Amino acid sequence: MWFQSGRRRDLCAILYDAGELRGQKLKTRLERYYDVRIDPQSFYGTLQALVDAGHLERRTEGIYDVYGLTDAGASRVESYYAWLTERVESREDSTADPGERIAD
């Protein structure tokens, strides 16, 4: 699987929504979502792995690194969303009252 971790998946989801973010702002958003402090070395290692895999691009803006999804990264987020939606909808269909199910 391309994510290999929930952190990678969640970083890509944040960037899918935001477009581009400075590294620190991205870290802050992820920490708010997780409600925990993330070790900077680990965080930036995760970003580098996503850059190396071709899912993120990094550019320098002044003294800051700015990250954004590549087309491949955005495609993977969309693919994961479709896969997850199918799982959720399948579960909803299987737990619905048989009289309420809509025929395919």
Image: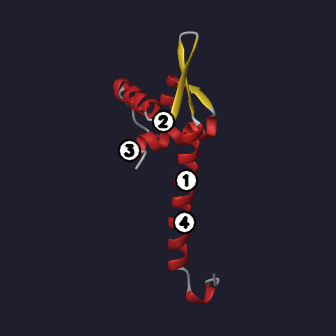
**Label pair 2/4, CB-CB below 8 angstroms:** no
Q: Position of residue 59 (x, y in %)?
A: 56, 20
**Disc 1, SS:** helix
Mark 4 lies on residue: 86
Q: Which mark is residue 5?
A: 3
Q: Which kind of residue does numbered mark 1 sit on? A: Ser
Q: Which-is-in-front pick, marks 2 and 1?
A: 1
**Disc 4, SS:** helix
Mark 2 lies on residue: 30
Residue visible at 54% across and 15% down? Answer: 64
Residue visible at 38% across and 44% down? Answer: 5
Cα distance in 3D space between marks 1 and 4: 11 Å
Cα distance in 3D space between marks 3 and 1: 16 Å
Write down the quadrant of residue 86 in the picture.
Answer: bottom right
Residue visible at 55% across and 39% down? Answer: 14
**Label pair 1/4, CB-CB below 8 angstroms:** no
Q: Residues within 10 Å of mark 1 (few under 14, many from 20)?
A: few
Tag 4 or tag 3, which sits nearer the N-term? Answer: 3
Q: Position of residue 22 (x, y in %)?
A: 55, 23
**Disc 3, SS:** loop
**Label pair 2/1, CB-CB below 8 angstroms:** no
Q: Position of residue 104 (x, y in %)?
A: 63, 81
Tag 4 or tag 2, which sits nearer the N-term? Answer: 2
* Residue extending furthest toward the top: 62
Q: Which mark is residue 19?
A: none
**Label pair 2/3, CB-CB below 8 angstroms:** no
Cα distance in 3D space between marks 3 and 4: 20 Å
Mark 1 lies on residue: 79
